[in-house]
Amino acid sequence: MSLSMYKITVPAFIRGFSILSSLIDKAEAFAAEKKIDPAILFNARLAPDMLPFSGQIQRVSDTSKGVVARLTTIEAPRFPDDEADFSQLRDRIAKTVAFLESVDTSALDGSESKKVTLKFGKMEVTLSGEDYILKFVLPNFYFHVTTAQNILRHNGVPVGKLDYIGALS
Amino acid sequence: MSLSMYKITVPAFIRGFSILSSLIDKAEAFAAEKKIDPAILFNARLAPDMLPFSGQIQRVSDTSKGVVARLTTIEAPRFPDDEADFSQLRDRIAKTVAFLESVDTSALDGSESKKVTLKFGKMEVTLSGEDYILKFVLPNFYFHVTTAQNILRHNGVPVGKLDYIGALS
């Protein structure tokens, strides 16, 4: 049972989506309790030039399915980022998780050394599959899960560290 | 060059501290430019019941050195969380990184199946070394790095996603 490219990514992603689903539950419950339009939390952000809550979920979705697309020959589904409410965000999560669950545990075998090219505007960088996961994907994935949680917490939704960590046993 | 418990933790931690150091540089430069007391950013937080910027760095330090303490027989240094300014936070980072750099790349070998018990108030959970890293440590580590960045960005410090990701090549 040694570590593998699959083990350090896909199960962690599925776990992250379960945590994001719980955050959406809490956001909706808070909006209902305080008689706040849920769209306010859906569109809330921490800085004017940062993505809102909805955008954080979209980027978590793209980051996770992009791993499969980049490290295997499997084609990942494309989503147009047109979710307009929490219910549609739940659908996005469900579709992403269904895709991740369809990936065989051996699909990423050998991808440690596969070359992955990332583009950021005019910048282009090529990494090994392993560096792509360890230096880019995992930090990025948790950045967006954390920022989704921070946005809610900043707006008074009662979510704490244990909600972010999720069930451990 | 297969994945290992060391490879998915210690180098990522050292990388994270380099990113946190750059964040501190940017926070200090912003405070100087805007003639703001640096203590305001040092103590800034996103919600009244969340840790301030300084506390995020302290938790990143504890999370990373705790891995070595829990998965090996090496004793990790203890820090009393008494940092009072950015300069002392830099020292905390330097001491943590020096400790992490002293850890041999083989020190975590075989720790995948080591039992690790975590306590949260009255709750206690025992995980394998592997689950401890994948379900608890990595999410937790990036939570605090991200929240440190979010705190600065929320306060107008010009830090963006590329600052968080850091150099990739």
Image (spheres, coloured by chain):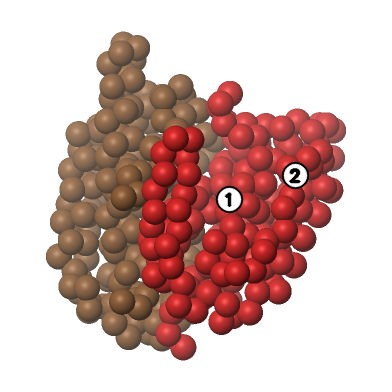
Chain colours: A brown, B red
Q: Position of residue A25 (x, y in %)?
A: 27, 30
Q: Which mark is residue B80?
A: 2
**Amino acid carrying mark 2 in the image:** Pro
Which of the labelled discs sits on residue B97, or is there none?
none
Which chain is home to disc 2?
Answer: B
Discs 2, 1 touching: Cβ within 8 Å? no
For mark 1, give the secondary structure. Answer: helix
Residue B93 position within the rendered picture, expressed as x and y whole percent measured from the top left: 73, 56
Q: Is residue B138 left or right of residue B80?
A: left
Q: Are marks 2 and 1 on the same chain?
A: yes
Q: Nearer the viewer, residue B70 or B141?
A: B70
Residue B102 percent location from the top left of the image: 71, 74
The chain to which mark 1 is attached is B
Nearest to viewer (mark 2 / mark 1): 2
Dividing the picture into quadrants, the one containing residue B114 is: bottom left
Report helix, strand or loop for mark 2.
Answer: loop
Q: Is residue B160 visible?
A: no
Q: CA distance from mark 2 to mark 1?
A: 20 Å
Q: Position of residue A166 (x, y in %)?
A: 35, 44
Of residue A155 and residue A76, the one placed in the foreground of this image is A155
Q: Find disc 1 in the rendering and name its residue.
A: B145
Q: Nearer the viewer, residue B81 or B17?
A: B81
Residue at 28 percent of width and 70 percent of height: A68
**Amino acid residing under circle 1:** Val
Instruction: Name the residue furthest bottom.
Output: B1
> Quarter of the image containing the C terminus of chain B?
bottom right
Q: Residue at x 74, y 37 (%)?
A: B42
